Amino acid sequence: MKNILLKFIFHLRKLWFHFLLFYRKLSYRAQGMKIGKQVYFGKLEALWPHQINIGNKVHIENNVVLKFDGFFQNGQAIIIGSDVFIGTVTEFNIKYGITLGNHCLIASGCRFIDHDHGMERGQLMKEQPCPGEPIIIGNDVWIGANAVVLKGVHIGDGAIVAAGAVVTKSIPPYEIWGGVPAKKLGTR
């Protein structure tokens, strides 16, 4: 009897998840987000959903933040390719843009930040312009847990970024980088 009850509860939870997913997709699409086929995501925070484009076969875990840090604009600032996995508690803090290629693996806790604060003396930093550049992640890239990718970085196809790395420079294709700041550790 206990197993039957547990199976019933499991199926109810599964139905509830699919209902919530359907509702979330419907709500975000109504706000202009482009969502491909076979896209699954849990609790997702998306500021300015109309600037987000998600490809096909994408799995986004819970508590991911897709934040366009700026005023309302038209166009797409966050582009996620197809067959991409994004782990829980990952944050995209984007002002200039990010492109994630196809077949990427983004582990839990990663941060993508494409801008800084101004640092000139004589004026409050929070009142200065925020310099920055878009971030571009190639195809088949693996970014380890809690890595940070900063403004202007281009990560080439097939590259690997070690867990906890802080990437401040572009990474050529098929190289493995790690550390703070990240540097080349090897090749694939």
Image (cartoon, rainbow, N blue to C red):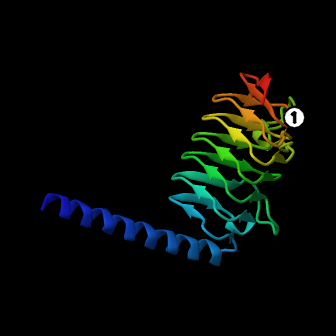
Q: 83 left or right of 167?
A: left
Residue at the location (85% across, 37% down)? 173
In this rendering, does residue 34 appear at all?
yes
Query: In the rendering, at what x and y percent does residue 110 appear?
Result: 64, 40
> Could you classify mark 1 by the number of other residues whose Cα lies within 10 Å: few (under 14), some (14-19), or many (20 or more)?
some
Q: In which quarter of the image is residue 40?
A: bottom right
Quadrant containing the N terminus in the rendered view: bottom left
Q: Quadrant of the C terminus?
A: top right
Residue at left offset 32%, top offset 67%: 11
- Using the image, determine if residue 33 lies above or below residue 105: below
> Which residue corresponds to mark 1?
172
Nearer to the camera, 158 or 177: 158
Does any portion of residue 184 appear in the rendered image?
no
- For image coordinates 80% across by 66% down, the residue present is 73
**Residue 60, above or below 120:** below
| In this picture, residue 85 sits left or right of residue 101 | left
Q: Where is residue 174 in the image (x, y as percent from the top left)?
A: 81, 35
Report the number of discs: 1
Residue at image position (76%, 28%) is 176
Which is nearer the eye, 89 or 10?
10
Question: What is the x, y in percent for residue 108?
Answer: 57, 41
Outermost residue, left side: 1
Of the residues shown, which amino acid type is indicated by label 1?
Answer: Pro
Which residue occupies the foreground of this view, 140 or 46? Answer: 140
Q: Is residue 172 left or right of residue 178?
A: right
Whether 132 is drawn above or below 181: the answer is below
Quarter holding residue 59 = bottom right
